[in-house]
Amino acid sequence: MAASSPVTDEDRLRRIEQITDTTLAHLDTEDLLVELLDRVRALLQADTAAVLLLDAAGDNLVATAARGIEEEVRQGVRIPVGKGFAGRIAAERRPVVIDEVDHSNVMNPILREKDIRSLLGVPLLIEGSVLGVLHVGTLRPRLFTSDDADLLQTAADRIALATRTHLTGLERAAASVLQRSLMPGALPRVTGVDFAARYVPGEAGGLGGDWYDVFGLPSGRLGIVIGDVVGRGLQAAVIMGRLRSALRAFALEEEDPAEVIERLDANVQHFEDNVMATVLYAIVEPSLESLTLSTAGHLPPVMARSGHPAALVNVPVDLPVGVSVGPPRRTTTIELPPQSMLFLYTDGLVERRGRSLDVGLDAVCEVVDADTDPEAVCAAVLHRMIGGDSVHDDVAMLVIRRGVTPAVVPLNIVVPAVPKVLADIRSSVRRWLGAAGATGEDMADVLVAVGEAASNVVEHAYGPAGGTLTLQMEREGGSVVATVRDNGRWRSARGHNRGRGTALIRQCTDEMDVIAGAGGTTVTFRRHITGEVP
């Protein structure tokens, strides 16, 4: 069995300098590792070389680059930590030598099939943490020496540093792309409401799990979210994306913000491992006069009213999502009067080392001004809170300002044409009519008319395949105009005493028009109301 020749200090220094140099800086991670493995093979006069990196869970080593045993990468070889040759190196965090390869000391069959006789492997270490494993092999028996192990460990240290640098860059780029794709490209246009938002990535550790979201709901309400996943980097951004999608799905099924967050919490605890996030979810009524919100560990919003200083909203703060046990979550209703502003933010805006959190919150309240354009408020807050300082944590902000609208905001509802939605439609219409100034008999008649039109769609417009029901309402002068639409095929009334819905609508309204065709049926009616717009 051959032994490698002793290595002098001069040879060691020359060889180490050859492992990495500035000419490798332009290579991507895969090409970089291949080039480094070729150099390691030449320096140690080995026939094979491979790098296996830990997966995200830290449980398995995954073949990432190989020379002489490229099959490892092509076949996606995975070695559990603590098992086999590479797994033992990762678990023990020290060099391992196998003078003679056999079934008892090597788990990967490729190493045996390639007739590799001797192996030397070392851990890839970064600040004491294992990143992966580097190993070399020979097709003839060889006694690897301590000098060989030292040289390979030095190469591994440089490979680990270069790999971490490249992977961190890729992770930041991927997180940046993911973050931009998940943030609303353009905030929705809502009559009577102005929005502005900012996202500022932290400089320490790249992007993280902060997000904001604004979306319309089938009931005509508006959903507003701001949240922060604990952690940083690509993994936090990926989790944020899953939470954002899950919350949107639950928001379509639940009307209570506390129930939405409760379902999100159950989702996180069941499907996510060691994940915690703070979330604030609010629902703005179609009238814009009020909103309901629930906060899971998130800092309270700032409310500003025209001519008055801004202040924190007095809202109970429940446990973050991902915490196993906690009391029932709570929903709070707050008014949103004309010319008022709601300012939502993540903790990266106000938390600073060596400074009380109250100082940061007070500073934000001093800047937020309901009489200022939301975009200008964002700029002013960032100027005051960040200025020229480095941002060590991500910052997300969302500003909602209700203006002074000359007319009531139109109501738009699009829901499945199924019986269970009729009660929700009635509730939304009642709230909207109250904001539009309808009272007493006027409100009762319009509710009856809308209810009959919506029931007709549910019962007559579609077959088993189903479809959608669209309701639009707006105030025009002294009247309320409602339009109920389907895209099905009108069916005549069936049975005794059926078909009285349209007659009842005519009795409750001043004008009614029905347009039926192959593309669906549209019922439009108008009712004069005596009340004034509030």
Image (cartoon, grey):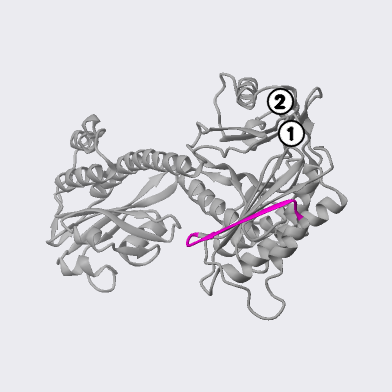
The disc label shown at residue 368, or none: 2
- Residue 86's place in the image compared with 109, above or below, is above
Split into 4 quadrants, where in the image is the N terminus? bottom left
**At 23% across and 32% down in the image, what residue appears?**
21
The disc label shown at residue 107, or none: none
Is residue 500 located in the magenta-colored stretch of the structure? no
Which element carries disc 2, helix, strand or loop?
A: loop
Task: Classify residue 75 as left or right of residue 512.
Answer: left
Where does label 1 land, which residue?
302
The answer to whether residue 315 is visible is: no
- Residue 359's place in the image compared with 283, above or below, is above
Which element carries disc 1, helix, strand or loop?
A: strand
- Residue 318's place in the image compared with 114, above or below, is above
> Which sits in the foreground, 517 or 206?
517
> Which sits in the foreground, 360 or 262?
262
Give the quarter of the image for residue 275. Answer: bottom right
Split into 4 quadrants, where in the image is the C terminus? top right
Percent position (x, y) of residue 469? 60, 60
Q: Amino acid at mark 2?
A: Val
Q: Which residues are magenta?
A: 509-519
Percent position (x, y) of residue 198? 56, 32
- Residue 408's place in the image compared with 471, above or below, is above
Please tell me whether the stretch drawn in magenta is mainly helix, strand or loop. strand
Q: Amino acid at mark 1?
A: Val
Task: Classify residue 346 as left or right of residue 531.
Answer: left
Callout 2–callout 1 Cβ contact below 8 Å: yes
Is residue 512 located in the magenta-colored stretch of the structure? yes
Percent position (x, y) of residue 50? 24, 54
